[in-house]
Image (cartoon, rainbow, N blue to C red):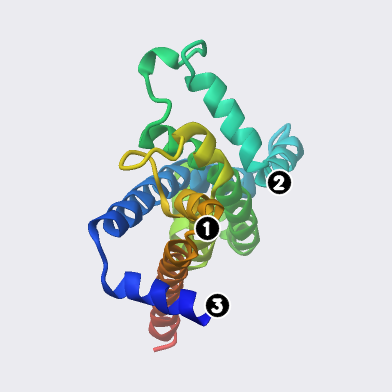
Amino acid sequence: MMEVLLRAGGLIVGWNDDLSEIVALSLQVTLSAVFISCLIGLPLGAVVGAFRFPGRRVAILMMNVLMGLPPVVVGLIVYMLLSASGPMGVLGLLYTPTAMIIAQTVLVTPIIAALSRQVVEDLHEEYAEQFASLGVGPAQRVMALLWDARFSLLTVVLAGFGRAVAEVGAVMIVGGNINHVTRVMTTAIALETSRGALELALALGLVLLLIALVVNLIVMTVRGTAVRAAYA
């Protein structure tokens, strides 16, 4: 085991083009999916959290249910949509990074929407009377709540990032794990482990952990700075 770990460390230190390509594609797919999910999920969660309307409980239930979507089911659904016989087959997106971004977006958006809904709902209880007295409109109310909760929502975005960057099943189905085309860290780890190439799989796993650590440190630093500024 120690020998494998040393060889994995050597692969990271010797960093080659294959590692760079896999890591770069992983970050491209994950960050793109998280960005799109935030554009959809944050406003959606804020609207459901801030307003009372018919069907709200159903909307909350659906968001909570969709948080637990099995990745392979999402991969299958996206595959059927993008396959040659599917409604979006003409676009030719199957087995491309775009297909992987779509699959990850479907997985991450409910998580961001559900978690942001809870954050915004708790915050709205503090500001509801003030909003009513000032006659703040719906759009301005949502924007104000999202802005005020921005540092708490960083944790929500981090949860979405963690879900996306660790995804295997869905991206394997719609991406195909094609070398130099759709191979990302998680699918490469699965492939190399099945081949018995544990040093490469372990090296990619360590890089994945390092990325997660860096993202967490950035979020903690931003939140800590915000807290200190608030009490300064």
Q: Residues within 10 Å of mark 3 (few under 14, many from 20)?
A: few
Q: Which residue is mark 1?
A: 196
Please name whichever residue, 42 or 78, is drawn nearer the observer in this view of the structure. Answer: 78
Q: Which residue is mark 2?
A: 64
Say which residue appears at 46% left-offset and 13% top-offset.
84
Which image quarter holds the N terminus? bottom right
Q: Secondary structure at mark 2?
A: helix
Mark 1 and mark 2 lie on one chain; the one further toward the N terminus is: 2
The answer to whether 44 appears left or right of 177 in the picture is: right
Q: Secondary structure at mark 3?
A: loop
Q: CA distance from mark 3 to mark 2?
A: 41 Å
Please name whichever residue, 219 or 170, is drawn nearer the observer in this view of the structure. Answer: 170
Q: Secondary structure at mark 1?
A: loop
Say which residue appears at 44% left-offset and 38% top-offset.
100
| Tags 3 and 1 touching, CB below 8 Å | no
Q: State the image quarter where residue 109 is shown.
A: top right
Q: CA distance from mark 1 to mark 2?
A: 38 Å
User: Identity of the amino acid at label 1?
Assistant: Gly
Which image quarter holds the C terminus? bottom left
Residue 126 position, x and y percent, is 62, 64
The answer to whether 147 appears left or right of 181 in the picture is: right
Q: Which residue is mark 3?
A: 1
Residue 55 position, x and y percent, is 73, 32
Please name whichever residue, 172 or 116, is drawn nearer the observer in this view of the structure. Answer: 172
User: Identity of the amino acid at label 3?
Assistant: Met
